[in-house]
Amino acid sequence: MRRPRAKRAEPAGYFAPPLPRLLAHRGLATTEVENTIPAFRAAVDRGATYVECDVHASSDGVAVVAHDPSLTRLLGSDQTIGGLTAARLAAIDLGAGCGFPTLEDALTALPGTFFNIDVKADAAAAPAAAAIRACGATHRVLVTSFSNRRRRAAVRLLPGVATSASARTFALALVAGRLRLAPVVRWVLRNVDAVQVPETALGLRVTTPRLLAMIHSAGVEMHVWTINDPVRMAELLALGVDGIVTDRVDLALGLIAETKRKRL
């Protein structure tokens, strides 16, 4: 059984659901467009408790759900999220009449769902925090970013919010872990609640029993991305990771259901 979280005041809401945490990466986009409300609903309809999304800021300073800074990959356009208003972005047809949602609209549309929010641009930190506050959703979000500056800018505006380590912070913890410096790992991770990581970083294996034990000793969860193979999901969960970030939350949920059935 997992040890109690012990490092800082508990952002209880986000971590209240039982393990494992299955995070629907950009929703469930097998039939819907990624990072849209229909994709999030598709994941929730399959039984997902957590969805993952990304945010940029529109030209009028609104937090908009989108992974890329430009529309190139999705629409073949050189326009940018930051160059268009939120209303214009919402009116763009990404498919099935669905546009780019604001973060506030996504949080409002799914009031019982936990959101993992990746702040993708400096300009998005304050608007993301404002949207979270407007929805009274601080207790059901985790705010993260590859950039520690962006992460901290948002977290400062959301007292008590759950947060995960930036890339640089985790890199320091990873190196300390490889050197078996558990006290250093705990110090580096003292202000975060989770690490959300690939299986390898800096050419080093992240998902090892020793490093996982050190991270857990810091009172921090490990969520691994982006895992779409159910066999590998099962192996990681057996290792003791706390969460799986996946494009196929439907398969992950099926795996958990089958595992529970076999235990009966």
Image (cartoon, helix red, strand yellow):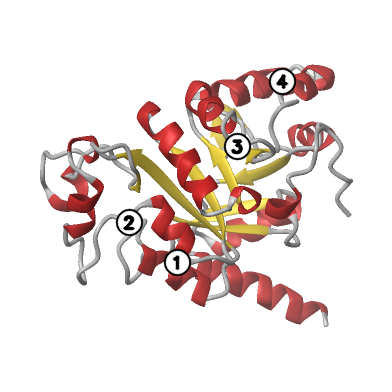
Tell us which disc is closer to us: 2 or 3: 3
Q: Tag 3 or tag 4, which sits nearer the N-term?
A: 3
Q: Position of residue 219 (x, y in %)?
A: 81, 37
Q: Which residue is mark 2?
A: 101
The residue drawn where x is 55% and y is 40% is: 143
The residue drawn where x is 48% and y is 69% is: 43
Q: Residue furthest front?
A: 134
Q: Amino acid at mark 4?
A: Val
Q: Which residue is mark 3?
A: 158
Q: How many marks?
A: 4
Of residue 103 and residue 225, the one placed in the foreground of this image is 103
Badge 3: how crowded within 10 Å, few (<14), some, or many (20+)?
many
Q: Tag 1 or tag 4, which sits nearer the N-term?
A: 1
- Tell me, yes or no, whether the two marked residues, 2 and 3, touch with CB atoms within 8 Å: no
> Could you say whether the residue bearing mark 4 is in a helix, strand or loop?
helix
Q: Position of residue 162 (x, y in %)?
A: 66, 41
Badge 2: how crowded within 10 Å, few (<14), some, or many (20+)?
many
The image quadrant that residue 1 belongs to is bottom right
Q: Is residue 260 left or right of residue 88?
A: right
- Quote the CA–CA distance across marks 1 and 2: 10 Å
- Tell me, yes or no, whether the two marked residues, 1 and 2, touch with CB atoms within 8 Å: yes
- Tell me, yes or no, whether the two marked residues, 2 and 4, touch with CB atoms within 8 Å: no
Q: Which residue is mark 4?
A: 188
Quadrant holding the C terminus: bottom right
Of residue 4 and residue 216, the one placed in the foreground of this image is 4
Q: Tag 3 or tag 1, which sits nearer the N-term?
A: 1
The residue drawn where x is 25% and y is 48% is: 86
Tell us which disc is closer to us: 4 or 3: 3
Q: Amino acid at mark 1?
A: Ala
Q: Which residue is mark 1?
A: 109
